[in-house]
Image: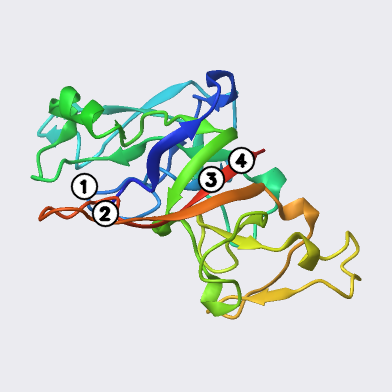
Amino acid sequence: MANRLLPFRQYDENDVINLFANDTSDTNPSTNGNGSAGVFVSVKSGGGNFSNDPITYVDRAELSASQDHTRNQYPEVQLKVTAASVGAFAGEVVGVTLKQTLEQDENGEKLLYNPVKKDELQAVLSGQAVPLATRGIFTLTSDAIDNAGGNIATHPTPGQACIISPETAGKVSGIAFTTLYGPTLTSTTGHAHVAGGGTVVKYTADHVIGTWIGTGTRRTVGPITDVAAGTYGVLKLNL
């Protein structure tokens, strides 16, 4: 689903940025993409120009309409973030999205016309600013965690460093602090991680965005499938 965050979390609102819109939106709550909540993001190239107007009006086929001699344009935040690139440095990561960016609900109805449902889904509309947490404790589902093609443990363990995945943008992985390279990449204990696509990332302390402090498994109880069932990790984020 489009929510990679579980309810348990601790953070201060002073550590939340409310300036940027996600450049990616998920079609509906069942979509698991870079518009989800729990995606780690960086400022998009050209998306951090504070000289621009705060919003611009654009044509959006899914939200606005354009008929003969008539337009109904949609306001959009100009500052943008995008999923943090594979193996990104910690300094390049702005934060983690606290809400999903959606266009429709599970029935295909536009959330533009149903703000109550939008709030129930803990979502913002495409083009709206999404809250980004920079520090705190967060519980991430397995959809937010990547094992990087088998070169990193299938699930992080407590005490490991949290780094941006070497395989999938916007996702995170775990790696032992003792296997980090030194600043000059000359450490003999460092590990080079190769993603499924062949990308080689040599992780140093400059890649670390936090520490994994716990893991667990949530099981389905009863006849109804628990959408949050599965493995999860508890992350102490520090950006």
**Residue under pointer 2:** 31
The image position of residue 215, as x and y in percent, is 50, 54
N-terminal of the two: label 3 or label 2? 2
Q: Amino acid at mark 2?
A: Thr
Proximity of marks 3 and 2: CB atoms separated by less than 8 Å: no
The mark lying in front, picked from 4 and 1, is 4
Quarter of the figure with residue 203: bottom right
**Residue under pointer 4:** 237
- Left or right: where 31 falls relative to 111: right
Residue closest to the eye, 154 or 151: 154
Q: Secondary structure at mark 4?
A: strand
Q: Amino acid at mark 4?
A: Leu
Q: Secondary structure at mark 1?
A: loop
Proximity of marks 4 and 2: CB atoms separated by less than 8 Å: no
Q: CA distance from mark 2 to mark 1?
A: 6 Å
**Residue under pointer 3:** 41
Residue closest to the eye, 235 or 194: 235
Q: Residue at x 49, y 24 (%)?
A: 18
Q: Secondary structure at mark 3?
A: strand
Quarter of the figure with residue 225: bottom left
Q: Name the quarter where the C terminus is drawn.
A: top right
- Left or right: where 95 falls relative to 175: left
**Residue under pointer 1:** 28
Q: Is residue 43 visible?
A: no
Q: Residues within 10 Å of mark 3 (few under 14, many from 20)?
A: many
Q: Residue at x 67, y 74 (%)?
A: 193
Proximity of marks 4 and 1: CB atoms separated by less than 8 Å: no
Proximity of marks 2 and 1: CB atoms separated by less than 8 Å: yes
Residue closest to the eye, 111 or 150: 150
Q: Residues within 10 Å of mark 2 (few under 14, many from 20)?
A: some
Q: CA distance from mark 4 to mark 1?
A: 28 Å
The image position of residue 69, as x and y in percent, is 13, 29
